[in-house]
Image: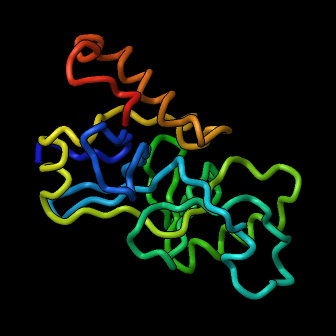
Amino acid sequence: MAGSLKGQLLLAGRQLRDPNFFRSVVLMVEHDAQGAMGLVLNRPGQARVSGALGEERDDVPPIHDLLFEGGPVEPQALFVVHQIVRLRKGCTTVLPKVYLGGGQDAFEDFLSWLSSHKKSKGPYRVFNGCSGWGPGQLDRELKRGDWMLLPATSEHVFEADPYSLWEQCVEEFMTLHPAIKGGGGNWRWN
C-alpha cells in the first residue's frame, strides 16, 4: 500500500463488473493496512431518512431527505456525513470541514442538532451501509484498473444532482489526465 486513500474518490472504471459499483463514485473514509471503507455518493435510495429511524420520534422532525445506499456492507448501519463543526467531536474528519459520524452516539447527536436547527440545516447526507475492502483488496483492484482516483471535495460529497456525479467526476478525471483519454476504450460505455 503506497499511502492512504482517505479523502479520495474512487470512480468505477469500465472493467469493474461488480453490480454493486457500476458507475459508482465512492468517497474513501478509511484506508490502511487493515483494509478500506467508503461510501457510495451517487446512489440515493427509495427510502427517506425518517423511515430508517424506525418508530416515529417526537424529538425529531420528519426528515424527508433520501437515504443514500453507501454500499453492500452492513446495510442496517447508518452513517452521516456532514459539515456541522459543532458535531465534529467523535467523528472522523474525511476532508477539511467534512465529517463522518457512525455509531449510535454520533447519530443521536446529529438528530438532536437537526431537531433544534429546523431552518439552517447545513449540508449532510445519511447513508445506510458502506463499502468495504479487506487487507490489500482495494490495492489489487486499483492495480487491475477497476478504479480511477480523484481528490474529493465537499462539492462532490454534497452534489445537488448525485445522479450525474459519476459523469462529472470522470470528465474531471480526464481533464486532469489527458494522456489517458486515447487509451483503454470509451469510458462512457461503463
| 169 shown above or below 27 | above
Q: Position of residue 182 (x, y in %)?
A: 24, 12
Q: Position of residue 10 (x, y in %)?
A: 34, 42
Q: Position of residue 144 (x, y in %)?
A: 13, 42
Task: Give me the residue at 53% from left, 36% from top.
Answer: 165
Q: Residue furthest bottom?
A: 55
Q: Is residue 144 left or right of residue 164?
A: left
Q: Is residue 8 visible?
A: no
Along the viewing direction, whichever of 138 and 111 lies nearer the viewer: 138
Q: Give the colour scheme shown.
A: rainbow
Q: Quadrant of the C terminus?
A: top left
Q: Position of residue 166 (x, y in %)?
A: 48, 36
Q: Is residue 84 visible?
A: yes
| 56 shown above or below 159 | below
Along the viewing direction, whichever of 72 and 5 lies nearer the viewer: 72
Task: Give me the residue at 11% from left, 48% from top.
Answer: 1
Task: Give me the residue at 12% from left, 50% from top.
Answer: 140
Corner quadrant of residue 13: top left
Task: Please give the count of numbered marks on the rendered protein.
Answer: 0
Task: Give me the residue at 37% from left, 56% from top.
Answer: 19
| 151 shown above or below 177 | below
Corner quadrant of residue 164: top right
